[in-house]
Image (cartoon, helix red, strand yellow):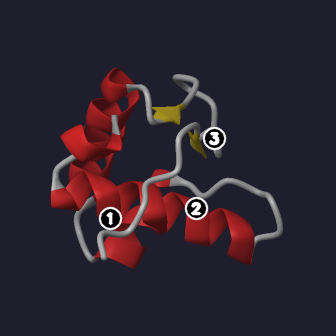
Amino acid sequence: MADRLSPRQRDFTRAVGVLTKRRRGLPPTLAEVAAELTVSTQRAAQLADACTALGVVIRERRVARSLRVVRPTRAKS
């Protein structure tokens, strides 16, 4: 599944993972992911929707800090 992700979607899932680790298990907000990727919050929401549709990220609508990576992406060597 991870091979179907665009480079930006991979960046998004990595950012969610990194920010979750940084906050000791607390998932990031879309605003925090947007700041990490230097994109708008709207673009972060679009990436979250795309990653959710692909099944690599889950999130609950209208719930803050509900982003979770289901299938971690692997870095290409």
Pointer 2 and pointer 1: residues touching (CB < 8 Å)?
Answer: no
Q: Which mark is residue 62?
A: none
Nearer the observer, 21 or 29: 21
Q: Quadrant of the C terminus?
A: bottom left
Hey, what amino acid is under mark 1? Asp
Badge 2: few (under 14), some or many (20 or more) residues near its Cα, within 10 Å?
many
Identify the element where label 3 is drawn.
Answer: loop
Tell me which corner region of the image, top left, top right, bottom left or bottom right, holds residue 2: top left
- For the point 38% across and 74% down, the residue is 35
Q: Tell me which numbered mark, 2 or 1, is placed earlier along the sequence.
A: 1
Hey, what amino acid is under mark 3? Ala
- For the point 16% across and 51% down, the residue is 6
Hey, what amino acid is under mark 2? Gly
Pointer 1 and pointer 3: residues touching (CB < 8 Å)?
Answer: no
Q: Tell me which numbered mark, 3 or 2, is placed earlier along the sequence.
A: 2
Q: Position of residue 21 (x, y in %)?
A: 72, 70
Determine whether 24 is above or below 58 in the image. below
Identify the element where label 2 is drawn.
Answer: helix
- For the point 58% across and 61% down, the residue is 17
Q: CA distance from mark 3 to mark 2?
A: 16 Å
- Residue position for label 2: 17
Pointer 3 and pointer 2: residues touching (CB < 8 Å)?
Answer: no
Badge 1: few (under 14), some or many (20 or more) residues near its Cα, within 10 Å?
some
- For the point 42% across and 26% down, the residue is 55
- Residue position for label 1: 11
- Residue position for label 3: 64
Q: CA distance from mark 1 to mark 3?
A: 21 Å
Q: Position of residue 72 (x, y in %)?
A: 52, 50
Tell me which corner region of the image, top left, top right, bottom left or bottom right, holds residue 7: bottom left
Q: Using residue 7 as the reference point, say whether residue 37 is left or right of it.
A: right
Q: Position of residue 18 (x, y in %)?
A: 58, 71
Q: Using residue 69 as the reference point, say whether residue 27 is left or right of it.
A: right
